[in-house]
Image (spheres, rainbow, N blue to C red):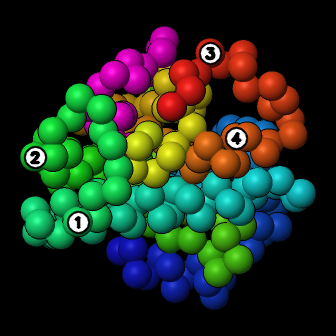
Amino acid sequence: MREKLSEFIANNLDAEFIMDNFDLINSGSSRDVYAISKSIVAKVAKEDSNGQRQNLKEYQVFEQCFSYQDMSDDDIKNDLSHIRFGNLYEDDAVRIAKGIVNSLAIVYAISPNNDILLMERLEGIVRGNIDLEEPSLIFLKQRFSLFEGDLQAGENWMYNVDGDTKIVDYGCDDDIAENHTEWGNLDKYDLDDE
């Protein structure tokens, strides 16, 4: 399915078509989200924003996490060798890596210019903040430098049909957050310096 959607998006979809033909269901600082079907959304980068970078980051994070499922333990350890995970042991990090893709909304395809990302559509926002000390979140933060404010925000977590929670907004890393002009001073997020 992912290969067919990649081909479809490359050959048939553009941002203007999506904006003109599908319902807008959410809007963020850098991207608008459109309902393509009951199971797929399109994240469309806004002009003059970090939306393309966030689409690409989500695509890269999902692809890497997806690849962990088929990697050997030694290959995963090699990939993670430069990362400090605090209280996580190396074997814990390998176990988390092999299952982390189940915590992410599925990314199906990205357009060649990164302005459109097709992702799994989920329902039901998680209320309240998420515990950043949860091992899988420590893993995502450390491995991909994901912005803690997005990882912690309950509105970025939704439920799938089985009732499992998945993060739907994981395209902002620390570099994007630091340089995002609309967010201004990040001190309001009370994030610990690492």
Residue 129 is a magenta residue: yes
167, above or below 12, in the image: above
The part of the image, by quadrant, that contains residue 150 is top right
Earlier-in-chain disc, 4 versus 3:
4
Q: CA distance from mark 4 to mark 2?
A: 31 Å
Q: Amino acid at mark 2?
A: Asp
Q: Nearer the viewer, mark 3 or mark 1?
A: 1
Residue at the disc numbered 3: 190
Earlier-in-chain disc, 1 versus 2:
1
Earlier-in-chain disc, 3 versus 1:
1
Q: Are marks 4 and 2 in contact (CB under 8 Å)?
A: no
**Label 2 SS:** helix
**Label 4 SS:** helix
Do we see residue 114 in this rendering?
Answer: yes
The part of the image, by quadrant, that contains residue 10 is bottom right
Residue at the (88%, 58%) spot, across then down: 47
Residue at the disc numbered 4: 177
Horizontal and vertical percent position of residue 98: 18, 54
- Dominant secondary structure (helix, strand or loop) of the stretch shown in magenta: loop
Q: Nearer the viewer, mark 4 or mark 2?
A: 2
Residue at the disc numbered 2: 91
Q: Which residues are magenta?
A: 126-140
